[in-house]
Image (cartoon, grey):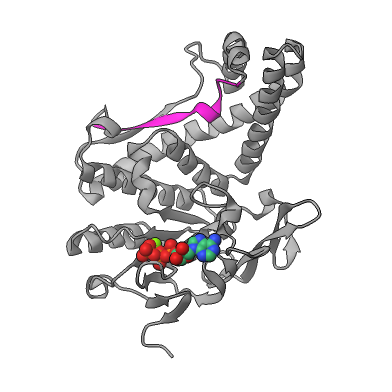
Amino acid sequence: MELRLLNFRSYPEAAVRLLPGANLLVGPNGAGKTSLLEGLSTLALTRAPRGGVTTDLVAWGSQEMGVSATVQAGGEEGREMVLELRWRFQPPSRRWVRTLRVDGNPQPVARYLGRLRVVSFWPEDLLIVKAGPEPRRRMLDVVLCQLFPAYAISLSRLRRALEQRNSVLRAVRDGAAKDQELEPWTGPLVEAAAAIMEAREGYLEEATPLAAAAALRIGEPTPLSLVYKPGIDDPEGGSWAERMTRALDRSRAEEVARAQTVVGPHRDDFEICLGGRAARQFASQGQQRTAVLALKAAEVAQHLSHGGEAPVLLLDDVLSELDLSHRAGLVQELAGGMGVEQSLVTATEDHGLGEVVRLSQVLEVRRGRVAPRGGG
Ligand SMILES: Nc1ncnc2c1ncn2[C@@H]1O[C@H](COP(=O)(O)OP(=O)(O)OP(=O)(O)O)[C@@H](O)[C@H]1O
Ligand SMILES: [Mg+2]
């Protein structure tokens, strides 16, 4: 794969050849290693991969950012395909406009997503176990958007319905609108919410045995399980649309008082349990790390079992805190053991990794320049 960056973070321009297998990126702090991984995952996800505003990724002072890659469609045997993502600032409207292209042809997001897939491990991913629900929801969204592009459409419909509905709720609270004015937004909200909750529930159900098996392989004997906690409190059951509708009805007074839609997938969470107990409260540091890695392993397994492109695995800075045998074990588990064909691993030093794991290349990153070690 060839990855090209234009005005992306600290890279004015860069082109990097990534080989099949494990690519190790080494370089000092601030050299641009993480930025390179962010570039590839932004291209896959069409937005900032770690939350926050996508335009923060634009090199400071630029009015245009681009990431593109030539990838093999359908694995190594398939034909080549060029994916391209561009953000341009439009001075008249003072807005950033995104374009997605496949082989030069503009594509809507639903026809673009899933052609390049990534599973990433960022240093802050420990928060998936430790912190509040936001990083867990983001984790679900990242994997589900890539697996099912229609999910991305549901997410943006949910966002729009919530915005509109909340602004009507403010008006109702302030006496400037009537309850009935909520109705046009309730239908779209219920529809998007039901699609999202169904997908999240299904994903977690399938992911539980996969994550548990991965945890066991990494060396955690306590059984791991994932329990969906939908953002609606409804013991009566029925379809997600029915449950969402009832939850909205029941929460109307609270909604108006707070001028906010208080039930729905934007309040979803899931619990990560070890031996049936919440890992957030009871698991040790090492067990929490294992749980996150197991979740990532389950992501990879889901991509492979749902067909389509094998994901590229991005491991940012995960090696530094581990001893050599755990490092090798980790890279082998994530890169080799699970059927990942290509991975990018960053580190400030090579940690002697090449002696224990087969690397396809070591790329040296220095102040925005990337070159293969030993190359010209
Ligand atoms: N939008 C931006 N425009 C220009 N430069 C940026 C932008 N965002 C971040 N940078 C800079 O890019 C540089 C490279 O950051 P990056 O996170 O890729 O480094 P790194 O090699 O991963 O370092 P570390 O080993 O410390 O994690 C940093 O000096 C950072 O300040
Ligand atoms: Mg970094």
Residue at image position (23%, 57%) is 321
Judge left or right: residue 224 versus residue 25: left
> Camera-side residue: 63 or 347?
63
> Camera-side residue: 303 or 110?
110
Residue at image position (64%, 36%) is 154
In this rendering, is residue 166 above or below 68? above
Residue at image position (36%, 56%) is 338
x, y (%) of residue 156? 65, 39
* Residue 267 belongs to the span the image colors magenta: yes
- Numbered disc total: 0
The magenta segment: 260-274
x, y (%) of residue 165? 69, 24
In this rendering, is residue 327 above or below 201? below
x, y (%) of residue 144? 53, 43
In this rendering, is residue 291 above or below 354? above
Judge left or right: residue 200 versus residue 188: left
Quarter of the image for residue 348 reads bottom left
In this rendering, is residue 317 above or below 257? below
Image quarter for ligand 2: bottom left
Q: Quadrant of the C terminus?
A: bottom left
Quarter of the image for residue 344 reads bottom left
Judge left or right: residue 76 versus residue 280: right
> Camera-side residue: 289 or 203?
289
**Residue 373: in sight, yes or no?**
yes
**Residue 339: in sight, yes or no?**
no
Outermost residue toward the right in this view: 92
x, y (%) of residue 22? 37, 69
> Camera-side residue: 343 or 163?
163
* Residue 259 belongs to the span the image colors magenta: no
